[in-house]
Image (spheres, grey):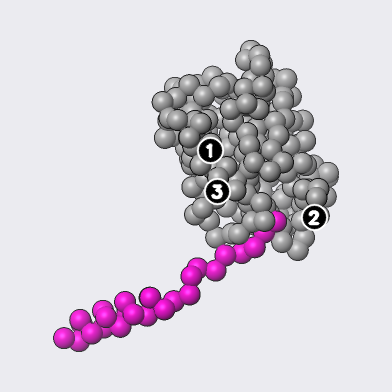
Amino acid sequence: MRSRLANLMIALFLLVLPARATQPVAIELVLALDCSASVDSSEYALQLEGLAEAFRDPEVLAAVEGLKPLGAAIVVMQWGGPGESNVAVPWTHIAGARDAKAFAYLIGLIRRWQYASSTSIATAIRDGERLLDGNAFEGHRRVIDISGDGPDNSGFNLSALRARALKSGITINGLTIEGEEKGLGQYYEERVIGGVGAFVEKARDFEDFARAIKEKLLRELRPLQS
């Protein structure tokens, strides 16, 4: 009898608990890195080195400082084939330059998760949306930042998943690594990006990734112009 009563009291207590508090931030940002088979080890290393370098760059640090007092919440996700993604650096509150430099250090510790056999941009959008919906932050803006070197060739419905993310108020930006895939920027513009202020930053190749990701972060971490 006591056990049943205790369980009832616990259940009632849980019902009246307030909803989980969320921390307000200027932006929730998912950085989604391509782990598909078309990206070899040296090319993937250039992505990581460029991303880490960006979070140590004085201009990016100044942009982060400009988000005070709210700051940004950022996660790094690796994506590949259909249904294949992995959180490489969990959600981190970056409140200032010191946090950004620490985040750069964490990026430097990332190990490649896998070599996916195909390229599922649809998975990057779907799992990026799940990360945005399931964290402990509440951003004035919610952005999925997809870096990739090829078009979607998976079995998932890219158009439907993109439309669902946009309907929920998410902005999808792209960083295309052109290389051998000519016209990839236009493909992203037509079929991948969307939402308020959405844009594509184009890297000529993986060697140009560091410059491109820096420029991309500068645009994403600065408040939108009204």
* Mark 2 vs mark 1: in front: 1
SS under mark 3: loop
SS under mark 2: helix
Of the numbered discs 3 and 2, the one sitting upstream in the chain is 2
Stretch of the chain drawn in magenta: 1-26
Determine which residue is flagged by label 3: 168
| Whole-percent x, y for residue 1 in the image | 16, 86
| Whole-percent x, y for residue 112 in the image | 52, 33
Say if the magenta span includes residue 38. Answer: no
Q: Residue furthest left?
A: 1
Determine which residue is flagged by label 2: 65
Q: Is residue 92 above or below residue 10?
A: above
Q: Is residue 94 left or right of residue 2?
A: right
Callout 3, which amino acid?
Ser
Callout 2, which amino acid?
Glu
Q: Is residue 203 above or below residue 126?
A: above
Q: Is residue 209 above or below residue 194?
A: above
Q: Is residue 108 visible?
A: no
Callout 1, which amino acid?
Ala
The answer to which of 180 and 48 lies nearer the viewer is 180
Q: Is residue 74 left or right of residue 69?
A: left
The answer to which of 173 and 195 lies nearer the viewer is 195
Of the numbered discs 3 and 1, the one sitting upstream in the chain is 1
- The residue drawn where x is 71% and y is 34% is 199
Determine which residue is flagged by label 1: 163
The answer to which of 209 and 66 lies nearer the viewer is 66
What whole-number distance in Å separates the C-alpha atoms at marks 3 and 1?
9 Å
SS under mark 1: helix
Say if the magenta span includes residue 21. Answer: yes
Q: Quadrant of residue 186?
A: top right
- The residue drawn where x is 54% and y is 69% is 21
Disc 2 residue crowd, few under 14, some 14–19, many 20+, Cα 10 Å? many
